[in-house]
Image: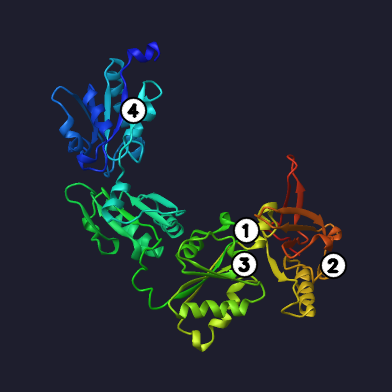
C-alpha cells in the first residue's frame, strides 16, 4: 500500500442481494460492520430499499450519507435534461463521499442486487475508484433471484441469455427477444405496456413469466400475459427461461407451421433476428445439408438433411411434419425467395391437402446484395437478376433475357453461373453482353462471400474468364454508368450512380 493510500479511507461497493436480508453475503455484513460511513441512494421521499435491506447491520454510531436523486421518472428543467441533472447529481454525490475518504474514513456504498449490475453504485465507482483503494462486494442479482423463485432453469448448455432494460425502444426489444434463447427484461414499471407488446410481437409472450419484488415482502409471480399493466412496479422483471425441456406454449400442439428461412450467404453474422428466433423455436429443421450445417445444434430439435436437388420432396416432407403439429423451419441459403426454397414450398403448399398448414417466408441477405456490399454499391440503380442455370429453363430463354436486360442498360446480377456439369454458359453470356456493353465494363466476381474461402474481385467484361467461375460465385455486371475506381488507400470500389443521364 502506498503512502497516499494510507492517508485515505477505503471505498466499498456493497452488493446486498435482491431484497431478503438473509441473502446478504458474509463479506457484505463484515464490510458494513467495519465501515465508518454508510451511504445509500434514495428517491426524494427518503426511503431507500438498499438501507432497508441492510438496516439490521447499521449501528447508531455509523455516519449515514443519503444520496437523494433530484429526479427519478419526472421531468426536469435542468439545461442538460434528465441526463444532465443526473450527471451533476452523481458528481456532487461523489464529492461528498470524497470528503470522508480524504479524512481517512472507510465508506460503504450500499447497493441492492450487485453493485456493478445496473446499479447506482457504478457511478460512484467510475468517479472515485481511480483515486482511492476500492473493493466491490458482489451480490445476488434480481435475475438470479427471479429464476430461483420461478423454479425453472434460466439458461442451459449453449443457450444464450440476454439481459435487456425495458427502457429500450419497443422495436429493439422485439428484435432481441425474437433472436435469443432466454432473456430477462428489467426496469419495468411504466415501460411494461411496451415490453409486453414486444414479447407479443416477437412471438415469445406465451413463454414469458413475471416476477415482482423477488425475495421481498409483496413478492408476486405469474404469467406475463395475465399481468395488469397498472399494477407493475419498477422492481419487477420479465423472464424467458430456458427452452430446453420446457413445455410447448399452449396453442401450438394441435397445429404446426412451416417457416421458410434464409440464412444469408454464409454463417450466423448474416442472420436476421427474426430468422434466428424462428430457427431456435422450431421442432424440426429441414434443408440442404450444407445449409443445415450453418445452424447450431439445439437439444430437442430434429434435423432432416437432403440433397440439393430434392426441393419438392423436401417441401412435401416439411409440410407433412407441420400437419402433425410440428413447428418446421425449412432452411435455405441467401434469401429463400431468390432462386431458393420458398418457391418450392409454396408450390407444394398450394395443393388442397396442405391448405390448412400455415406457411411463412422470412427474408435473408441474398448473394447479390452481399457481393455488392463488399465492393461498394454496384446495385445502386436499376438492375435485373437472372439465373444462368438451364436446368429449369431453356438456354434460349436465358439468352433472350440477357439481351433484353443488356439493351435496357440494366446492371445484371447473374446467379448460378456455372458448375462442374455447366461450363459454357458464362462464356456465352459474356459474348451476348459484349454486343451491348463496353469491354471495360466492370464485372464483380464474388465467391463464398462471408465464408472462409471468400474472394471478391473486379475485372473487365472482356477479361472475364469462365474457368474462374463456379456454382459458389455470383457475378455483377455493370451498366454503362457503373464506375470502377481505385482510391488512394488502394481499395477498389464499384458503384452505379442513382442519377441516369437524360437522352
The Cα atoms of the two marked residues, 3 and 2, are separated by: 30 Å
Q: Which mark is residue 91?
A: 4
Q: Which residue is mark 2?
A: 427
The Cα atoms of the two marked residues, 3 and 1, are separated by: 14 Å
Disc 1 crowd, CA 10 A, few/some/many (<14, 14-19, 20+):
many
* Relative horizontal placement of residue 475, taking residue 266 as reference (left or right): right
Q: Position of residue 107 (x, y in %)?
A: 27, 24
Element class at badge 2? helix
Picture quadrant of residue 71: top left
Tags 4 and 1 touching, CB below 8 Å: no
Query: Which quadrant of the rendered structure holds the C terminus?
Result: bottom right
* Relative horizontal placement of residue 184, taking residue 397 as reference (left or right): left
Tags 4 and 2 touching, CB below 8 Å: no
Q: Which residue is mark 1?
A: 266
Identify the mark nearer the N-term, 3 or 4: 4
Disc 4 crowd, CA 10 A, few/some/many (<14, 14-19, 20+):
some
Q: Which mark is residue 289?
A: 3
Q: Position of residue 323 (x, y in %)?
A: 46, 81
Identify the mark nearer the N-term, 1 or 2: 1
Q: Which mark is residue 281?
A: none
Identify the mark nearer the N-term, 3 or 1: 1
User: Against 29, is 300 above or below?
Assistant: below
Q: Nearer the viewer, mark 4 or mark 2?
A: 2
Query: Which quadrant of the rendered structure holds the N terminus?
Result: top left
- In the depicted view, which residue is nearer to us: 293 or 338? 293
Residue at the spot 86% in from the left edge and 60% down from the top edge: 462
User: Against 250, is 463 above or below?
Assistant: above
Q: Position of residue 304 (x, y in %)?
A: 56, 71
Identify the mark nearer the N-term, 4 or 2: 4
Amino acid at each position: 500500500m502506498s503512502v497516499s493510500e494510507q492517508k485515505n479511507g477505503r471505498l466499498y461497493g456493497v452488493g446486498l442481494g435482491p431484497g431478503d436480508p438473509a441473502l446478504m453475503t458474509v463479506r457484505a455484513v463484515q464490510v458494513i460492520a467495519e465501515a465508518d460511513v454508510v451511504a445509500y441512494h434514495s428517491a426524494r421521499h427518503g426511503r431507500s430499499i438498499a438501507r432497508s435491506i441492510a438496516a439490521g447491520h447499521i449501528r447508531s454510531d455509523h455516519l449515514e450519507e443519503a444520496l437523494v436523486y433530484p429526479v427519478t421518472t419526472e421531468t426536469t428543467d435542468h439545461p442538460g435534461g434528465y441526463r444532465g441533472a443526473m450527471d451533476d447529481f452523481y458528481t456532487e454525490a461523489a464529492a461528498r463521499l470524497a470528503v470522508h475518504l480524504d479524512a481517512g474514513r472507510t465508506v460503504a456504498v450500499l447497493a441492492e442486487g450487485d453493485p456493478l449490475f445496473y446499479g447506482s453504485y457504478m457511478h460512484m465507482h467510475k468517479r472515485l475508484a481511480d483515486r482511492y483503494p476500492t473493493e466491490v462486494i458482489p451480490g445476488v442479482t434480481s435475475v438470479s433471484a427471479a429464476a430461483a423463485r420461478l423454479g425453472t432453469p434460466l439458461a442451459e448448455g449453449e443457450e444464450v441469455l440476454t439481459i435487456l432494460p425495458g427502457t429500450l425502444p419497443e422495436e429493439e426489444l422485439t428484435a432481441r427477444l425474437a433472436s435469443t434463447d432466454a432473456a430477462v427484461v428489467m426496469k419495468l414499471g411504466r415501460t411494461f405496456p411496451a415490453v409486453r407488446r414486444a414479447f407479443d410481437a416477437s412471438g415469445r409472450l406465451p413463454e414469458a413469466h413475471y416476477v415482482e419484488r423477488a425475495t421481498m415482502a409483496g413478492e408476486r409471480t405469474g404469467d406475463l400475459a395475465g399481468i395488469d399493466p397498472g399494477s407493475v412496479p419498477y422492481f419487477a422483471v420479465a423472464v424467458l427461461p430456458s427452452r430446453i425441456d420446457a413445455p410447448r406454449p399452449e396453442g401450438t400442439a394441435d397445429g404446426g407451421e412451416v417457416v421458410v428461412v434464409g440464412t444469408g450467404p454464409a454463417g450466423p453474422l448474416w442472420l436476421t433476428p427474426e430468422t434466428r428466433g424462428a430457427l431456435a423455436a422450431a421442432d424440426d429443421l429441414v434443408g440442404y445439408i450444407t445449409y443445415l450445417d450453418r445452424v447450431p445444434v439445439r437439444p430437442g430439435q430434429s434435423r432432416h438433411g437432403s440433397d440439393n436437388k430434392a426441393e419438392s420432396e423436401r417441401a412435401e416432407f416439411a409440410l407433412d411434419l407441420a400437419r402433425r403439429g410440428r413447428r418446421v423451419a425449412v432452411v435455405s441459403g441467401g434469401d429463400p425467395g431468390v432462386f431458393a426454397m420458398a418457391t418450392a414450398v409454396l408450390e407444394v403448399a398450394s395443393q388442397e391437402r396442405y391448405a390448412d398448414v400455415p406457411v411463412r417466408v422470412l427474408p435473408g441477405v441474398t448473394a447479390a446484395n452481399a457481393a455488392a456490399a463488399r465492393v461498394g454499391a454496384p446495385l445502386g440503380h436499376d438492375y435485373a437478376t437472372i439465373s444462368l442455370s438451364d436446368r429449369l429453363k431453356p438456354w434460349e430463354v436465358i439468352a433472350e433475357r440477357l439481351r433484353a436486360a443488356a439493351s435496357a442498360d440494366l446492371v445484371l446480377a447473374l446467379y448460378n453461373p456455372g458448375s462442374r456439369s455447366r461450363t459454357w454458359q458464362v462464356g456465352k453470356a459474356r459474348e451476348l453482353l459484349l454486343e451491348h456493353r463496353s469491354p471495360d465494363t466492370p464485372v464483380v466476381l464474388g465467391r463464398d462471400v462471408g465464408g472462409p474461402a471468400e474472394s471478391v474481385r473486379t475485372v473487365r467484361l472482356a477479361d472475364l474468364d469462365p474457368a474462374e467461375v463456379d456454382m459458389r460465385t455470383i457475378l455483377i455486371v455493370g451498366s454503362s454508368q457503373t464506375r470502377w475506381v481505385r482510391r488512394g488507400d488502394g481499395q477498389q470500389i464499384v458503384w452505379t450512380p442513382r442519377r441516369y443521364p437524360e437522352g
